[in-house]
Amino acid sequence: QVQLVESGGGLVQAGGSLRLSCAASGSIFSINTMGWYRQAPGKQRELVAAITNSGSTNYADAVKGRFTISRANAKNTVYLQMNSLKPEDTAVYYCNANLHDLLTLRYDTYWGQGTQVTVSS
């Protein structure tokens, strides 16, 4: 089985920073894209940032220039450095990974349980 475990959420004042981490473990052969999504109350889940196994990145317009996604392939871990946080960044942040599962022998997308980020004004 595959597990994605996030950490690093919390409460921060506007203008502050947080760093989220997400570690994938279990029956993993290889990981393609890893990403971060967020869901605010009453809104749909949206992509924040994604990174391929070769390091190509993609960001939502709302976070460009403030957030940085990175990954440590040897650790099956993805990070999200969030700077200049705004109250509108408040949401539950989820990581996901598209990976080759050794048990199912196919590529599937897995999700973490989510971590709360709250930015106070």
Image: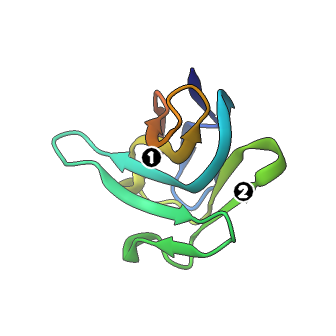
Quadrant (top left/top right/bottom left/bottom right) for the N terminus: top right
Circle 1 — which element? strand
Q: Position of residue 4 (x, y in %)?
A: 58, 31
| Amino acid tagged 1 | Ser
Disc 2 packing (10 Å; few <14; some 14–19; many ≥20): many
Is residue 21 something that shows in the picture?
no
Cβ–Cβ under 8 Å for marks 1 and 2 = no
Disc 1 packing (10 Å; few <14; some 14–19; many ≥20): some
Circle 2 — which element? strand
Apparent side of residue 79 relative to residue 2 in the rendered image (left or right): right
Residue that protrudes farthest toward the right in the picture: 74
Determine which of the numbered discs, if any, sits on residue 106 in the image. none
Q: Position of residue 16 (x, y in %)?
A: 61, 56
Q: Which residue is mark 2?
A: 71
Residue that protrudes farthest toward the front in the picture: 105
Is residue 56 depicted above or below 1 in this figure? below
Q: Position of residue 7 (x, y in %)?
A: 64, 33
Residue at point 49%, 63% (across, down)? 49
Q: Position of residue 116 (x, y in %)?
A: 46, 34
Residue at point 60%, 65% (across, down)? 52
Per the model, the C-alpha gap separating discs 1 and 2 is: 28 Å
Q: Nearer the viewer, residue 4 or 103?
A: 103
Q: Which residue is mark 1?
A: 120
| Amino acid tagged 2 | Arg
Apparent side of residue 6 relative to residue 58 in the rendered image (left or right): right
Q: Earlier in the sequence, mark 1 or mark 2?
A: 2
Residue at point 69%, 71% (across, down)? 54
Is residue 57 depicted above or below 24 in this figure? below
| Mark closer to the observer (1, 2) | 2
Is residue 85 something that shows in the picture?
yes
